[in-house]
Image (tube, rainbow, N blue to C red):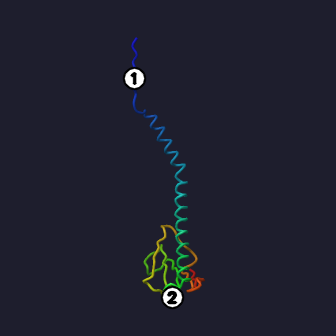
Amino acid sequence: MEYIIEKNFGFTLIELLVVLALIAVFTVIVAPFGADFYREQILQEQTQSLSSNLKLVQSRAMAGKNDSAWGVKFYPENQGCTDCYVLFQGGSYDGRDEDEDRVFNLSPGMTTEGMKEIVFEKGTGSVMRIVKE
């Protein structure tokens, strides 16, 4: 008696279609969660960055660095950006020392609302001036 052993390598078309369908269903279910996670991470990163920059400016004012007040200006028109803020030295953005400017960009789609400018008092670090929108 003779036995014939057939060797089948590869996948059938049905098997490939089933796997592709499972991948598509998985992607449709998981993709929204991934996008939300990404947005949340960007928001958290931007919040931490802005918070530490505000603390930096306040500490410079408290230390009286360059014998001056320090502040933050959101969306300065003369910097040519609609999604940035500037750390500056001086009692106001208009009367600042431009050599000390540090520009930080916000991620696309991120905005701040309520304030255009915050200035911290030299020596104490107290909020000396707030310019609202």
123 vs 78, nearest the viewer: 123
Disc with the residue nearer the chain's start (1 vs 2): 1
Amino acid marked by disc 1: Glu
**Location of residue 19 with respect to 66 vertically, above or below:** above
Residue farthest toward the front in the current orientation of the protein: 63
Circle 1 or circle 2, nearest the eye: 2
Specify the amino acid type for callout 2: Asp
**Residue at 46 percent of width and 41 percent of height:** 20
Q: Total of numbered circles in the picture?
A: 2
Q: Residue at x 49, y 70 (%)?
A: 106
Q: Residue 90 location in percent, x, y?
A: 50, 86
**Which labelled disc corresponds to residue 76?**
none
Q: Is residue 82 above or below residue 7?
A: below
Question: Mark 1 touching mark 2, by CB under 8 A?
Answer: no
Q: Which x, y percent locates residue 128?
A: 59, 85
Residue labelled with disc 2: 67
Q: Nearer the viewer, residue 96 or 65?
A: 65
- Secondary structure state at the residue bearing disc 1: loop
> What is the CA distance from the residue labelled 1 to the residue labelled 2?
89 Å
Query: Which quadrant of the figure contains the N terminus?
Result: top left
Q: Residue at x 57, y 81 (%)?
A: 132
Mark 2 packing: few (<14 Cα in 10 Å), some, or many (20+)? some
Q: Is 13 situated above or below 6?
A: below
Q: Quadrant of residue 36?
A: bottom right
Based on the displayed image, in which of its 4 quarters is residue 7 positioned?
top left
Quick one: quadrant of the C terminus?
bottom right
State the SS at label 2: helix
**What is the residue that sits farthest to the top in this orientation?**
1
The residue at which mark 1 appears reads as 6
Q: Residue at x 52, y 74 (%)?
A: 53
The one of 65 and 49 positioned closer to us in this rendering? 65
